[in-house]
Image (spheres, rainbow, N blue to C red):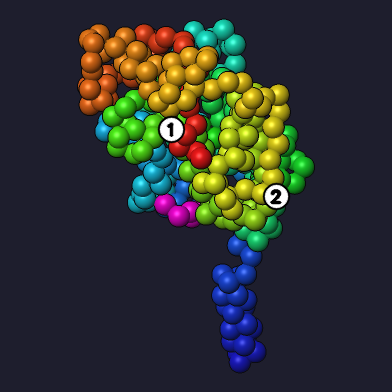
């Protein structure tokens, strides 16, 4: 009887010890904002549609990205979130953007793919920024099944696009000192999220590589140049894209075009149907109306002053 009690006591201490050592990664993971439940397929675990920023809706349209809000209980991370608003006809032409009929301004989410067995593995982390001319695309286009076979954790990111992610306006500049580049602020916020949370998925927060293709590669160039990303990543890979073309200045005309603010005002008049819409009026326009009336030029005339 005494021997049995000693055995049970030793066994109980072994279970207590497990709580302070390596923690096995299950489909339920506790992160800074709350708990999430992902999906397991063999030794692959994927966590989809995780919010990394506060939804940029209502008065937060065109605001810089803010940290995600906390939640109670367990949030499902078992399926892709809605993608960011983008011109449907362009995405249909490329026939590659999933969930094109499932768009929302509440789209600032990311996906984590990992084969780590426990939270102490410290696998290298790769953060992917999709291409699409900063106008279309989504993180859910790129599954992590294959890449994670090579001993890395993959994170793919949604960020604001087109007129929602790269819109300049004098009133916005007055509020923040600059305007435009909301999409790049999303990317920076996603890197902050990765730095804070990736260890819970078995990743190494001190071994983060950013990479992207086309406009995603362009984004990588911008993130490399920005002092706002200091300490958020350690390596960078750009594929088929570089920030070398002439860009629009925030409030000065160049040889190539009007200023970004002038283009923003031109676009505003088209959207609001009057000569001088206020910023508050613009924030009330339904997003589907903005996409339906999209004009090309202002989308490509982005400016980068807020990153320098």
Magenta span covers which residues? 29-33
Residue of label 1? 182
Locate residue 24, reporting x and y percent: 62, 58
Locate residue 130, reporting x and y percent: 59, 28
Give the total number of marks visible in the rendering. 2
Task: Find the residue positioned furthest to the right.
Answer: 150
Horizontally, residue 200 falls left or right of residue 180, namely right
> Is the N terminus in the top left, top right, bottom left or bottom right quadrant?
bottom right
User: Which residue is drawn at the image coordinates 61% and 21% (left, top)?
Assistant: 245
Is residue 198 covered in magenta?
Answer: no
Question: Does residue 198 appear in this view?
Answer: no
Q: Residues within 10 Å of mark 2 (few under 14, many from 20)?
A: some
Residue sitting nearer the eye, 62 or 1? 62
User: Which residue is drawn at the image coordinates 54% and 22% (left, top)?
Assistant: 247
Q: Residues within 10 Å of mark 1 (few under 14, many from 20)?
A: many
In the rendered view, tell whether residue 11 sits above or below residue 171: below
Task: Find the residue positioned furthest to the bottom.
Answer: 2
Looking at marks 1 and 2 on the same chain, the residue that comes earlier in the sequence is marked by 2
Horizontally, residue 83 falls left or right of residue 209, namely left
Locate residue 196, reporting x and y percent: 52, 54
State whether the magenta stretch is mostly helix, strand or loop: strand
User: Which residue is drawn at the image coordinates 23% and 18% (left, top)?
Assistant: 277
User: Which residue is drawn at the image coordinates 36% and 38% (left, top)?
Assistant: 177
Looking at the rendering, which quadrant does residue 107 occupy?
A: top left
Residue sitting nearer the eye, 274 or 127? 274
Residue of label 2? 124
Looking at the rendering, which quadrant does residue 60 occupy?
A: top left
In the rendered view, tell whether residue 216 sits above or below residue 74: above
């Amino acid at each position: 009887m005494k021997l049995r009690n000693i055995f049970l006591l030793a066994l109980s201490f072994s279970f207590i010890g497990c709580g302070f050592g390596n923690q096995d990664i299950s489909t339920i993971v506790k992160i800074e904002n709350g708990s999430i439940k992902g999906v397991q397929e063999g030794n692959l675990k994927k966590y989809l549609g995780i919010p990394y920023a506060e939804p940029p809706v209502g008065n937060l349209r065109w605001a810089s990205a803010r940290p995600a809000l906390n939640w109670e209980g367990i949030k499902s991370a078992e399926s892709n979130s809605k993608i960011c608003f983008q011109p449907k006809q362009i995405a249909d032409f490329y026939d590659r953007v999933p969930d094109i009929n499932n768009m929302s301004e509440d789209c600032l989410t990311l996906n984590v793919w990992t084969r780590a067995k426990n939270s102490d593995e410290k696998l290298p982390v790769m953060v992917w920024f999709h291409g699409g001319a900063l106008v279309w695309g989504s993180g859910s286009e790129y599954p992590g099944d294959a890449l994670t076979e090579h001993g890395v954790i993959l994170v793919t990111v949604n960020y604001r696009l087109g007129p929602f992610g790269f819109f300049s306006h004098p009133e916005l500049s007055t509020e923040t000192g600059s305007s435009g580049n909301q999409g790049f602020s999303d990317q920076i916020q996603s890197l902050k999220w990765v730095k804070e949370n990736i260890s819970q998925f078995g990743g190494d927060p001190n071994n983060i590589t950013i990479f992207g293709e086309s406009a995603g590669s362009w984004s990588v160039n911008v993130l490399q140049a920005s002092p706002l990303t200091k300490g958020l990543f350690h390596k960078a890979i750009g594929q088929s894209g570089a920030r070398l073309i002439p860009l629009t200045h925030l409030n000065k005309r160049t040889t190539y075009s009007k200023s970004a603010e002038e283009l923003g005002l031109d676009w505003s008049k088209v959207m609001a149907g009057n000569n001088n819409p206020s910023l508050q009026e613009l924030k009330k326009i339904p997003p589907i109306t903005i996409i339906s009336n999209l004009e090309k030029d202002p989308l490509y005339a982005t400016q980068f002053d807020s990153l320098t």
